[in-house]
Structure formats: C-alpha cells, structure tokens
Image: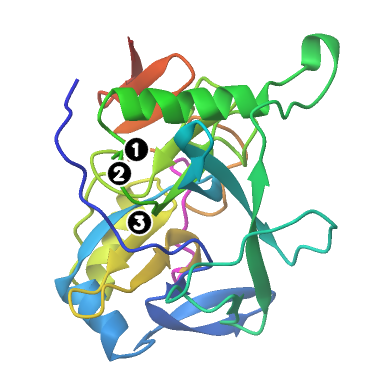
Amino acid sequence: MDTQAPIKYDFNGGKLFHIFQTESQGRNLVYTDQFLNEDAKLAFTQGKGILKIDGECCAIHLEETEHGYMWRFYRRQDNYKGSESTMPLPDGAQLDTYDQGGKPHHYCFLPMKVGYATGKGSSRSLVGFNTYQAISNGVKLGLIPDPNAPEWITCEWVGTKHQKNMDGIPYEHALVPHYEPFLPQISASDFEGFKAMAREECFEGVVFQSPVTNKRYKLRTNMMPEGIIWDCENKKKKPSGPNVTTIRPLKVLTKDGCLTWNGSEWKLEQL
C-alpha cells in the first residue's frame, strides 16, 4: 500500500463556485466562455485540477474526547430545517450561503453517530459503522493524517446508497477524501480542450485550486455548451445507472480496507 503523505487542499465543504460564468438555456444552466473572475481563471490555467466525483459531500473532524482524539463524521446538509445540533463551517471557509445561477443554498454539517443505521431485516444498512470503519482504515494505512491538533478534511461519501454510484463502487458506504492519492489529477488548460475531453471521457467534472488564493472552483461536464455531457454511449444525456465512468478515484476507503482502481476493475487490499 502506498502510504506517501497526501497532498492537502484547503477546507471547502460547501458548494463550489464554477470556473466560468453561467447562463440559462431552457431549464438548465450552461457555461459561457467568460471566467467567473481572475482567480478562477488562474485556477483553470495555472492551478492543479483533481477529479470531481459523483457522491455526497461530507467532512471528518478530529476532536478531543475523554478517551483522546477521535475522528467525527459530518454530513453536509443543504437548507437544513431539522432540530438536531449542527456544526457551522469553520472560520475563514467559504460563505455559508451559496448562490450562482439564482439558486441560493444555505449549508451546515450534521454529526453522525457510530451506531446510526437505516432499514430493517435484510435491508438494514449499518451506515455509521461502515463509515467510521472506513475512516479508521484510512488512519491505519497512513492515508488520513493523524495530526496533534484538530482539523477538517472534506470527503465524498460514495457507494451504492449514494447518488447514482457512477463509479461502480461495490460498497453501500465508502469515503474518498478530497486530496491525492485518492483523486487523480486532470489536465485542462483551455475551454476547447476541456470540451474535447468531455467528448471522449465519461466523468462528472474537475475541481481546480487557485495557486494564488488556494480557493477551489468546479467545472462540470454536464454544463458544457453544445450538449456535451457525461454519457459515454450517446453523449446526449446524463447516465442513469452505475459503473459508467471512464475516469475514477484511484483509492476508496471502505469498511474492509482500501479499494484501488487499476483502470479496469476495483481491487481490495485488506488490513
């Protein structure tokens, strides 16, 4: 198992702003060829791009307890109106209300207990146990840093119970932290080059980080003009089933160990 120190990215657990400005096309938003701002332009032309994957945004936070430090898992909640106690975004992070394209969202984080589960009988899903075991495995493998002071790490919550599972991950609940070596680098230096890539590859998008401000911006293939979106078969509509992407996370943390994508199939390395 490769245990090299991961490359860290600044915390950003809310909605990312798009690299390009958007305009309405029917009921959908599509990109124009105008950058959102100069920092977004620098992120796209000079910054590092990492794969954006299909899942649910979450975060883990190292917290002190009576038994020492432990990682706590948080689910991102958009426009949360429940009664449970929530965690606001850390100071200095992106604003807690996002609005690009006229659809404002307010978001926060909701902690999840280890014993949280859903369903009954054969449909019972051990959400908390599976997720916390994946975190523990990441620490044991040296893929999640274990610092002396608390910090936040944002992740993608993936698997058969999350979104479309476009990457075909064979677990109900698994984690992909938002840094290398989990997410591969994606190179794209101009608008036309990214459109060409979207024609040939099936993936959700790319997140670019500015080399100046360290802010992150996103670029989604399903918002490119001219109908270029992430269906490998006919290039005309969003895929409706799992296991369709051609560019996938390199590593995924699961309750049993670390899944590695070798370009054609998932391989599990157990502890």
Q: Which of marks 2 and 3 is in front?
A: 2
Residue positioned most to the front: 66
Q: Can residue 75 be seen in this view?
A: yes
Q: What residue type is labelled 2?
A: Leu
Q: Which of marks 1 and 3 is in front?
A: 1
Q: Residues within 10 Å of mark 2 (few under 14, many from 20)?
A: many
Q: In which quarter of the image is the N terminus?
A: top left
Is mark 2 in CB contact (under 8 Å) with mark 1?
A: yes
Residue 102 falls in which quadrant of the image?
bottom right
List x then y, in percent, for residue 106: 67, 73
- Above or below for 137 versus 164: above
Residue 183: which disc? 2
Residue 198: which disc? 3
The residue shown at (45%, 78%) is 31
Is mark 1 in CB contact (under 8 Å) with mark 3?
A: no
Q: What residue type is labelled 3?
A: Ala
- Dot 2 falls on a residue whose secondary structure is loop
Q: Earlier in the sequence, mark 2 or mark 1?
A: 2
Cα distance in 3D space between marks 2 and 1: 5 Å
